[in-house]
Amino acid sequence: MASTHNVLVRAIRHAEADDHVGRNVASLVKPPQGKTGRPSRPMTAVEAAALLAAAQDHPRLGAYVLLSLTTRIRTDLTRTIVRVPGRYPQFAAEHDIEPEAAD
């Protein structure tokens, strides 16, 4: 959060110098103190292969793991893509994934 605030302050400072804005209001705001997140570490290749092998027989879990490991998109977005019925039918067909029934 602090780095985002810093970037914003500097960008507005440049705009202020060029007379695009009258005042840098971002410099008046104190950014909130964030919480320390839990430590994370990337999976090793062996761990990723074991996870993929364990999930391959489950249609949705296998798709979720495959997308997560190969695309590096956020896991909450991966769950949404795999869960939505009829979405990305080409991916489902190429990987023999049965679409989830609509609720």
Image: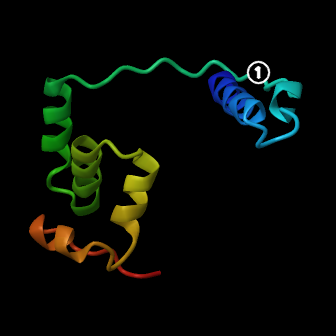
Please give left or right for residue 27 compared with residue 53 in the image.
right
Q: Residue at x 21, y 57 (%)?
A: 58
Q: Residue furthest front?
A: 18
Q: Measuring from the top left, give residue 32's x and y in whole percent.
A: 79, 26
Q: Is residue 13 above or below residue 84?
A: above
Please give left or right for residue 24 compared with residue 100 in the image.
right
Can you tell which quarter of the image residue 70 is in? top left
Q: Measuring from the top left, give residue 59's x and y in whole percent.
A: 22, 62
Q: Measuring from the top left, give residue 92's x and y in whole percent.
A: 20, 70
Q: Residue at x 43, y 54 (%)?
A: 77
Q: Is residue 97 above or below residue 61?
A: below
Please give left or right for residue 63 compared with residue 19 in the image.
left
- According to the image, label 1 marks what residue? 33
Can you tell which quarter of the image residue 89 is in? bottom left
Quick one: SS at disc 1? loop
Q: Measuring from the top left, give residue 44's x and y in whole percent.
A: 21, 22
Q: Is residue 27 above or below residue 67?
A: above
Q: Amino acid at mark 1?
A: Gln
Please give left or right for residue 3 compared with residue 79 in the image.
right
Q: Residue at x 36, y 46 (%)?
A: 73
Looking at the rendering, in which quadrant would you find the N terminus? top right
Q: Residue at x 24, y 57 (%)?
A: 63
Looking at the picture, tell me which residue is in the foreground, 32 or 14.
14
Question: Badge 1: how crowded within 10 Å, few (<14), some, or many (20+)?
Answer: few
